[in-house]
């Protein structure tokens, strides 16, 4: 299987390639009005305004570095009634890696989005599920509530 490796602060992470729509360079974003700090902008993308979340702000408490390896990973999130593309800005987005079996790490209930480690890859990145990565408050901003 393939995954895209990246960093968010000191955290070495990876997203399964099947979850990724596209990887884009850092671009100028439209500033959202009164958005939470992690929502750094709106990206005109494929005829929509796609929200972009800085993973370094969410995970490390600081903005992503303005460097060549900082990219926007476009993923699709969904609930029971709709789906939407979201950009995830991360650092050191550089390579698609092939991986085999994974190994569980520590299970942190506060950060359940942290998955298994890719033990055959340098740095032992942890797989993350984009659907679980964003806090509920951000997901609620991006998707309508599912009807009861």
Image (cartoon, rainbow, N blue to C red):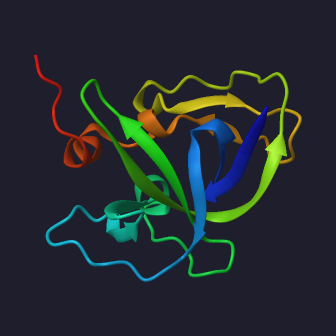
Q: Quadrant of residue 26?
A: bottom right
Up the image or down, 82 lies above or below 14; here it is above
Q: Quadrant of residue 135?
A: top left
Residue sitting farthest toward the front = 47
Q: In x, y percent, where is residue 148?
A: 10, 16
Q: In x, y percent, where is residue 147?
A: 12, 22
- The reply, left or right, for residue 4 in relation to residue 43 is right
Q: Quadrant of residue 67?
A: bottom right
Residue sitting farthest toward the top = 148
* Residue 38 appearing in the image: no
Q: Residue at (37%, 71%) from the top-left corner? A: 44
Q: Residue at (24%, 41%) from the top-left corner? A: 143
Residue sitting farthest toward the left = 148
Q: Quadrant of the N terminus?
A: top right
Q: Residue at (47%, 28%) from the top-left corner? A: 112
Up the image or down, 119 lies above or below 93; here it is above
- The reply, left or right, for residue 108 in relation to residue 39 is right
Up the image or down, 141 lies above or below 126; here it is below
Q: In x, y percent, where is residue 115?
A: 60, 29
Looking at the image, which is closer to me, 74 or 12? 74
Looking at the image, which is closer to me, 33 or 119? 33
- The reply, left or right, for residue 20 in relation to residue 50 is right
- The reply, left or right, for residue 48 in relation to residue 104 is left
């Amino acid at each position: 299987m393939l995954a895209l490796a990246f960093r968010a602060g000191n955290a070495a992470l990876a997203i399964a390639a099947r979850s990724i729509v596209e990887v884009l360079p850092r671009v100028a974003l439209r500033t959202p009005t009164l958005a939470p700090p992690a929502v750094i902008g709106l990206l005109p993308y494929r005829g929509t305004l796609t929200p972009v979340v800085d993973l370094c702000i969410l995970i490390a408490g600081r903005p992503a570095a303005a460097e060549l390896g900082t990219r926007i990973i476009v993923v699709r999130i969904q609930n029971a009634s709709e789906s939407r593309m979201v950009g995830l800005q991360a650092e050191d987005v550089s390579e698609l890696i092939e991986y085999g079996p994974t190994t569980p790490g520590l299970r942190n209930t506060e950060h359940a989005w942290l998955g298994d480690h890719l033990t055959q890859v340098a740095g032992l990145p942890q797989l993350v599920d984009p659907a679980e990565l964003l806090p509920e408050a951000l997901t609620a901003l991006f998707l309508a509530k599912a009807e009861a």
